[in-house]
Image (cartoon, rainbow, N blue to C red):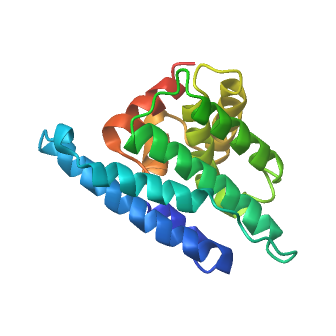
Amino acid sequence: MGQGFADLLHTSIVFDEFIRRICELRFLIVSLRLAQLNGKLYLMPSQFKEKCLAVEGELSGPIAITTTTINHCQILQCCHISCLIFIRTVLLGESHVMSKTLTTFGASLRAALEETDLTYSWSKLSKLLLWVLFMGSTATSGGPLYSWYMDHFMRTAASLQLQNQDQCRDCLRKFLWLETMSQTQLQCCFKI
């Protein structure tokens, strides 16, 4: 859970702070998972939601871009938006149905992805791209952008030689993933 982001380490200093946010999100995932296992989701304290929103606020901040880091910053922007989607859909349980926030995140993520070259920019980060596209499909499920995400998700999965749902799940688990909720979202991807 989260080890897939290790490919970003030592790539560029722009990813250092992001990796710290991933560690915070991993802690929140473990907290939520323990509450699920103990049947105590109803006891999740307000501090959990506050911490989720605090991480969301940190990820929503501007990214300093220089000419030497512009490509990395574009990828980082995609990662930030994907984490925002994860926080909203998985940790906070927000439904994509009628969610203006998720619709906005989905559109922003697509725009950020289109600023990168999906082949060249992500060549060494194809598994991360798969997770980013998965989060985009989660935010836009049932909406007009969903097919765009699914088309690119399936192409990326094919380029990684992932041939079925189990192989995709094994790849996606290396990023941010909460079994019960994320698995349900992945099943939706394979119903098309």
Residue found at x 58% / y 48%: 82
Residue 114, image x and y in percent?
Answer: 81, 45
Near-viewer residue (133 or 171): 133
Q: Is residue 93 above or below residue 53?
A: above
Quarter of the image holding residue 163? top right
Dividing the image into 4 quarters, which one contains the C terminus? top right
Q: How many marks?
A: 0
The answer to whether residue 191 is left or right of residue 132 is left
Near-viewer residue (165 or 20): 20
Quarter of the image holding residue 138? top right
The answer to whether residue 160 is left or right of residue 43 is right
Residue 125, image x and y in percent?
Answer: 65, 60
Camera sees residue 175: no
Residue found at x 55% / y 21%: 98
Dividing the image into 4 quarters, which one contains the N terminus? bottom left
Q: Is residue 32 above or below residue 147?
A: below
Q: Is residue 12 above or below residue 133?
A: below
Residue found at x 53% / y 64%: 5
Residue 39, image x and y in percent?
Answer: 13, 38
Name the outermost residue toward the right: 67
